[in-house]
């Protein structure tokens, strides 16, 4: 039987049955897959760092004890990172980069925000772009030069959709996870789409990372969430709840009451099952938030 989160040392600990833990972990991976698909379609998908001793999924290996959690102190800081260099090597690499580009990092402030010149409305030659203008998509050949894409007519590079505007997801569940930053009635024409193009890549990346981390933590027995990871774990649970709420049609207090009643009605098998999932994930998130508040006070 599941037991709620409680503060234990520098972490929050809950006890879940193996089946319960695997179920929530699978939900986390299912929601992450939705976001993976969105990132792939928008061109924002970045390969994730993998570890040989990490479970491939909730059913890949038996749940581990909290003391068996793998650590990766020697892992690179992020995708594509190289092993730690000595100060001399790092200085040489930095100097080489600046010499090759002719500009320091302070001149490319947009890169720190995950943006490109096209996102700022600037073309490859410094010209201003119209809102609906698309830039040609080019690949790099073996010599570092621009190569035409296969299938492009007349040898010309194939166009890509502009990155300056991005449409709202058509899946209502994804739209709940990635809402517009401005209400439709209050936005100027195209404002919501422009803001989405700037902010969605980072939001999707953060949610994908949170959900992957949550699935991994759920392989521990008991479930032990370090205090520093608790806000991200709670965020992942909330994203699962948002998707389930959309699938259940929860838009108001009356809808919530209907779903609560469905937990006691096994006649509607699918509705009953989804209502139980929604109720359990909501309880788990609430117990973590309660434990967080207790520790603060």
Image: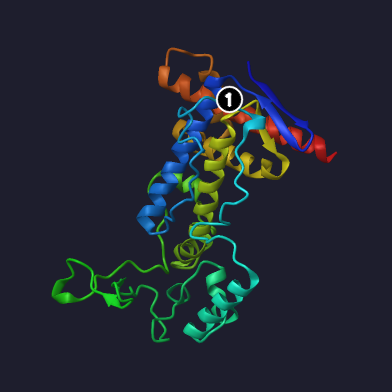
How packed mark 1 is, by other alpha carbons closer than 10 Å (few <14, some 14-19, many 20 or more), is some
Q: x, y percentage for residue 166?
A: 41, 61
* Quadrant of the image containing the C terminus: top right
Identify which residue is drawn at 53% across, 18% down: 263
* Quadrant of the image containing the N terminus: top right
Q: Nearest the camera: 248 or 211?
A: 211
Q: In this figure, which residue is indicated by the disc labeled 1?
A: 280
Q: x, y percentage for residue 98?
A: 53, 82
Identify which residue is drawn at 66% across, 43% down: 229
Residue 127, picture quadrant: bottom left
Q: How is the image coloured?
A: rainbow
Q: Nearest the camera: 283 or 114?
A: 114
For the view shown, which residue lies furthest in the left direction? Answer: 154
For the view shown, which residue lies furthest in the right direction? Answer: 297
Identify which residue is drawn at 59% across, 32% down: 253
Is 139 left, or right, of 63 in this rendering? Answer: left
Under circle 1, the secondary element is: helix
Kindly tell me whether residue 169 is visible in this rendering: no
* Image: 245 above or below 63: below
Q: Nearest the camera: 10 or 39?
A: 10
* Count of residue discs: 1
* Image: 94 above or below 202: below
Identify which residue is drawn at 34% across, 75% down: 133
* Image: 126 above or below 91: below
Q: x, y percentage for residue 141?
A: 28, 72
Q: x, y percentage for residue 37?
A: 38, 48
Kindly tell me whether residue 283 is visible in this rendering: yes
* Image: 162 above or below 98: above
Residue 92, picture quadrant: bottom right
Is 220 left, or right, of 142 in this rendering? Answer: right
Q: Nearest the camera: 6 or 133?
A: 6
């Amino acid at each position: 039987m599941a037991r709620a989160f409680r503060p234990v040392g520098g972490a929050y600990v809950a006890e879940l049955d193996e089946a319960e833990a695997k179920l929530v972990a699978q939900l986390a991976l299912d929601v992450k897959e939705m976001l993976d698909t969105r990132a792939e379609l928008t061109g924002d998908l970045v390969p994730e760092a993998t570890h040989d001793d990490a479970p491939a999924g909730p059913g890949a290996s038996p749940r581990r004890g909290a003391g068996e959690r793998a650590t990766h102190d020697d892992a690179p800081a992020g995708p594509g990172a190289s092993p730690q260099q000595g100060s001399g090597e790092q200085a040489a690499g930095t100097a080489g980069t600046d010499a090759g580009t002719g500009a320091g990092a302070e001149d490319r402030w947009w890169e720190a925000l995950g943006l490109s010149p096209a996102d700022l409305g600037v073309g490859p030659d410094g010209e201003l772009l119209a809102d609906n203008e698309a830039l040609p998509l080019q690949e790099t050949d073996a010599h570092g030069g621009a190569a035409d894409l296969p299938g492009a007519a007349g040898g010309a590079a194939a166009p890509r959709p502009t990155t300056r505007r991005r449409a709202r997801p058509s899946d209502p569940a994804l739209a709940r996870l990635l809402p517009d930053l401005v209400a439709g009635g209050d936005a100027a024409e195209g404002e919501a789409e422009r803001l989405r193009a700037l902010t969605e890549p980072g939001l999707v990346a953060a949610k994908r990372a949170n959900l992957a981390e949550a699935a991994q933590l759920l392989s521990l027995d008991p479930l032990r969430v370090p205090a520093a990871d608790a806000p991200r774990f709670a965020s992942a649970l909330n994203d699962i709840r948002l998707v389930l709420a959309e699938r259940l049609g929860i838009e108001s207090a009356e809808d919530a009451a209907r779903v609560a009643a469905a937990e006691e009605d096994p006649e509607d098998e699918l509705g009953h099952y989804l209502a139980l999932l929604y109720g359990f994930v909501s309880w788990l998130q609430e117990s973590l938030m309660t434990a967080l508040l207790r520790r603060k006070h």
